[in-house]
Amino acid sequence: MSISLIRQGLATNLATIPGLRAVAEVPDLPNPPIAIVALNSVTYDRAYANGMTSYSFTITVIVGRVAEREAQRRLDAYISTGSSSVKYAVESDKTLGGNAYDCRVVSMDSVGSLTISDNTYLAADFSVTVIAN
């Protein structure tokens, strides 16, 4: 299975969140609000005659400048349930366009500030597990 296609599938699902840009590769200069999909680890030979692989991804959602009042509200919506939920968007097509058996958001690991080009942004990291062959 192509890791690029899995990353693109995750970005496509995330792009269904109103107002959130989603990219499958780390951009040179992110423009918030944006979700960035990055591969963390790969576990081979999970089952079925070594035909199943588990991929761990981190989705970093950069919401906006820390000083913006709206940034925290947006982040709350991304973490919660509803039309802006990262979990619901990622899991809306668990096959990622036919490129996976299953995917799920397993946790929101951290919330904090992130400095990019002398600007400090509010950001959160979500852990996603994808099972594919």
Image (spheres, rainbow, N blue to C red):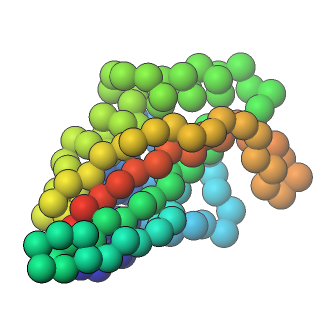
Q: Is residue 34 visible?
A: no
Q: Position of residue 90 (x, y in %)?
A: 32, 45
* Vertical placement of residue 52 versus 76, above or below: below
Q: Is residue 110 visible?
A: yes
Q: What residue is at 57 percent from the left and 67 percent from the top?
A: 26
Give the quadrant of residue 98: bottom left
Q: How many marks?
A: 0
108 or 28, which lies in front? 108
Q: Residue furthest right?
A: 118
Q: Position of residue 108 (x, y in %)?
A: 51, 37
Q: Position of residue 65 (x, y in %)?
A: 75, 36
Q: Position of residue 43 (x, y in %)?
A: 37, 71
Q: Quadrant of the C terminus?
A: bottom left
Side of 76 where 119 appears, left or right: right
Side of 17 where 20 appears, left or right: right
* Vertical placement of residue 88 versus 7, above or below: above
* Vertical placement of residue 79 versus 128, above or below: above
Side of 56 where 115 appears, left or right: right
Side of 107 where 68 appears, left or right: right
* Vertical placement of residue 61 versus 52, above or below: above
Give the quadrant of residue 125: top right
Give the quadrant of residue 49: bottom left
Q: What residue is at 39 percent from the left and 30 percent from the top?
A: 85
Q: What residue is at 16 percent from the left and 78 percent from the top?
A: 51
Q: Quadrant of the N terminus?
A: bottom left
Q: What residue is at 37 percent from the left and 43 percent from the top?
A: 105
